[in-house]
Image (cartoon, grey):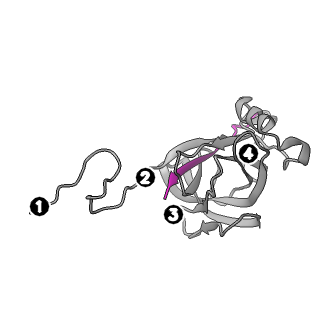
Amino acid sequence: MTLERSTSGPCNPSDDYVTQFPWRPVGSLFDIHAVLGAAELGAATVKALAANGLGQAAIFYPENGTVATEFRFYSDGAAADEAATVEVYGASGDDYYRRIAQLTVTIGAGQKSSATVLFADTIAEAVKVWLTTTTPVSPADNTMASWGLNMHGIDRIAFLASAATMDLDPAVAGTADDALYIEARRF
C-alpha cells in the first residue's frame, strides 16, 4: 500500500507529515512612537496608531486556533548593525493591551530579496512580561533571527518602535526613511 500526500489544505489524520505554515506579512514600522502609557492601552487607541498611515504601529491578528507564533524582521533601507527598539503588546477581544516584551532588533547583512533588503540577525529581549517563555532565536551571524511566543488565547499583538539607530523618523528632511517590516508564521 502506498500513502499519497495531500497537495492542498491542512493535514488530515491519515497524513504522515506536519502542516507547514508560510511566513505572512504583519505590517511595517517607519516612525517612532513612545512606549504606551496606561491611558494609551485601549484597543481603539492602538488600532488608530496602526491605521493612521504614519507607520507608528503594526498589528498581528493570528488565525483561529493559533497556539504559538514566530516573528521575523527585516528592513528595506537600514544598514547592517543598525537597530530598532520594538515594544510588543498583546490583547484579546475589546480589552486593553498589555506589554509583553521589549525587543532590540538588529539588522544583519543577510539579504532577503536584494542588497538593500536585509534580515534582522539579532533579537535581544530587554523586557519580558508574559505567562510563559518567549524565545528569541538570535544567531547574530548575518542570517535570520526570529522571536516566538505561545499566544495563550490572545487575538492580536501590536508592535511599535520606541527608538532606533536606523532612520525611522520621517521628520528628518532630505533622508530616505527606512522601514522595519514584520512577518509571522504559526508553529
Asked if the residue at tag 1 contacts the one at tag 4, i.e. Cβ–Cβ closer than 8 Å, the answer is no
Dot label at residue 2: 1
- Real-space Cα separation, disc 4 to disc 2, in angstroms: 32 Å
Asked if the residue at tag 2 contacts the one at tag 4, i.e. Cβ–Cβ closer than 8 Å, the answer is no
Question: How many residues crowd around disc 3 within 10 Å: few (fewer than 14), some, or many (20 or more)?
Answer: some
Residue 49: image location, x then y, percent: 76, 35
Dot label at residue 21: 2
Question: How many residues crowd around disc 1 within 10 Å: few (fewer than 14), some, or many (20 or more)?
Answer: few
Q: What residue sits 90% from the left and 48% below the top? A: 38
Q: Is residue 43 magenta?
A: no
- Real-space Cα separation, disc 4 to disc 1, in angstroms: 56 Å
Identity, as a three-letter code, of the amino acid under mark 3: Thr
- Real-space Cα separation, disc 4 to disc 3, in angstroms: 22 Å
Residue lying furthest top: 52
Residue 119 occupies quadrant: bottom right
Dot label at residue 151: none
Residue tagged 3: 143
Q: Earlier in the sequence, mark 4 or mark 3?
A: 3
- Real-space Cα separation, disc 1 to disc 3, in angstroms: 39 Å
Identity, as a three-letter code, of the amino acid under mark 1: Thr
Q: Quadrant of the N terminus?
A: bottom left
Q: Earlier in the sequence, mark 4 or mark 1?
A: 1
- Real-space Cα separation, disc 2 to disc 1, in angstroms: 26 Å
Residue 164 visible to an observer of this rendering:
no
Closest to the observer, 125 or 39: 39
Find the magenta span and give its range: 174-187
- Real-space Cα separation, disc 3 to disc 2, in angstroms: 20 Å
Q: Secondary structure at mark 4?
A: loop
Residue lying furthest left: 1
Residue lying furthest front: 13
Residue 105: image location, x then y, percent: 67, 58
